[in-house]
Image (cartoon, coloured by chain):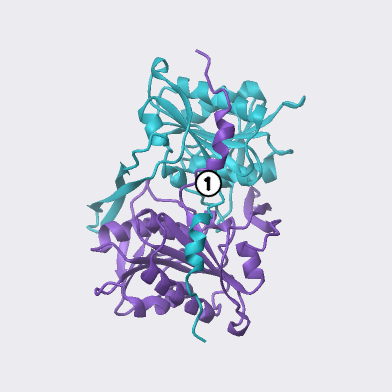
Chain colours: A purple, B cyan
Amino acid sequence: MSEKKPLILVSNDDGITAPGIRNLVDAVKHLGEVVIVAPDSPQSAMGHAVTISKPLRLYQTDIYGDIIAYQCSGTPADCVKLAVDKVLHRKPDLMVSGINHGSNSSINVLYSGTMSAAMEASIEGIPAVGFSLCDFAYDADFSLAKKIAARVAENILEFGLPTATLLNVNIPKIAENEFKGVRICRQAVAKWKEEFDERLDPNGRKYFWLTGKFINNDTGEDTDEWALANNYASMVPVMFDLTAHHAMPRLNSWDNSIKK
Amino acid sequence: MSEKKPLILVSNDDGITAPGIRNLVDAVKHLGEVVIVAPDSPQSAMGHAVTISKPLRLYQTDIYGDIIAYQCSGTPADCVKLAVDKVLHRKPDLMVSGINHGSNSSINVLYSGTMSAAMEASIEGIPAVGFSLCDFAYDADFSLAKKIAARVAENILEFGLPTATLLNVNIPKIAENEFKGVRICRQAVAKWKEEFDERLDPNGRKYFWLTGKFINNDTGEDTDEWALANNYASMVPVMFDLTAHHAMPRLNSWDNSIKK
């Protein structure tokens, strides 16, 4: 670590008042100067959305006392973009996102606003990590998650992260004495089987509400799902270069010529 | 191809009335039975957002004549989920998304609603491809893009796609006689340098509008950006397993133990 205090940007997708982000601030504030830029309302499942068709609001708030905090009307990715361009006066040394109320393991990394904030930071060249606790409850117990977040943040500040790589850390809903450690994993090959709840509105018109079941058919013991089911916290290194290099030879065998 | 007519799901992010999706329908309708489920309003830059905190509307529309078409109040990913669960009675043989008005090359794959619709289909196990024309104009010339879309769709129906892989196809804004062919590429390492336009509303309160400059420092000749700049259409195989396997050994060297 440099002599200068590390600058740590904190965001999330559950909104600036969520217990998860308060716990994350508590977990990392001893490591440097913390600045919070987080959504003013819940932004779960926003994926990597950014707001281009309407203006954004950004207001300072004193709910974190001495810690500089801004609430933003946009998505988690917007928060990071605004933080970098309008709030911070130097590039942060670390960006931490979360602690999400609910799992972002496996395929959920794609839908997650928590992870999109971390990914946006990583695209900016900022070492970044998203933390999620496998407990949706507002009054979830964040004590284990906080300790893990602190340790991982320390490690990133000390050792850095490989280029264009961020971390997706999920913490199981267990007591600390059951916890077996942090395990480096791959993203499990799982998916949501969607089921739309079909209802009628007060005017008799149909509407749909997204529900679904998480289906994991991946039996590997090297996955995040396996780790979480076996009392480990999962740590998946995530990249935003989505190129499927292994598929190139097959595609190169196609004739893609067009009719003149 | 099987004896049965292939079922082709079409969606986009510019909305069901956009010229781009009309051109895509024209390009592929000779290949099978086409069903359209697309957003009822523009959903650009929605990333992989899904709608979980409010209900969705889905209404049939006759603007495509004999072709079955539904407009949905949700995101592109919602459209695909609703199509699979509520509209289609068998799994589609192909999902095509677009043709987007504007490029989705390089890092834009992450922000793109067009690509998130294709990715959602791919997660469902449906061979999928997103098409984008590097021209934002409403009255853009889609004639070259249509021919490429038709050819690529034919190839996917004939040869399939590797497991858990979809395609991101971008078409340059050039005349057909300048076109050099379709090139299999990797995603260029580029990013947006955001710049927020800072303004005052009629009440004197500040707001921000996201703008930005696309910065490509990747000089490789195997990238989508290089292809597009050199009169090729780019075809990038895309995966949704984001695991950065190469980063694992380094992370395994960390001590992540927590204080008891």
Q: Position of residue A152 (x, y in %)?
A: 45, 72
How packed mark 1 is, by other alpha carbons closer than 10 Å (few <14, some 14-19, many 20 or more), is many
Pick whichever, B120 or A166, lies toward us: A166
Instruction: State the SS at label 1.
Output: loop
Depicted A183 relative to depicted A142: above or below = above
Residue at 54% over, 75% down: A138
Task: Compare residues B50 and B217 and report the one nearer the observer.
Answer: B217
Is residue B199 in view? yes
Q: Residue at x 62, y 23 (%)?
A: B29
The x, y position of residue B224, in whole percent, is 42, 35
Q: Residue furthest top?
A: A260
Q: Is residue B236 left or right of residue B199?
A: right
Residue A214 vs B221, above or below: the answer is below
Quadrant location of the N terminus of chain B? Answer: top right
Q: Quadrant of residue A2?
A: bottom left
- B194 to the left or right of B228: left
The chain to which mark 1 is attached is: B
Given residues A144 and B43, the one toward you in this image is A144
- Circle 1 sits on which residue? B75
Query: In the image, is residue B76 above or below residue B4?
Result: below
Tell me residue A170's x, y (percent): 55, 68
Identify which residue is drawn at 52% across, 21% down. Answer: B147
Residue B137 visible in image: no
- Please say if A130 is above or below B51: below
| Residue located at (41% from left, 62% from top) | A161
Image-quadrant location for residue B119: top right
Q: Residue B194 location in percent, x, y?
A: 30, 50
Residue type at numbered disc 1: Thr
Q: Is residue B12 left or right of residue A161?
A: right
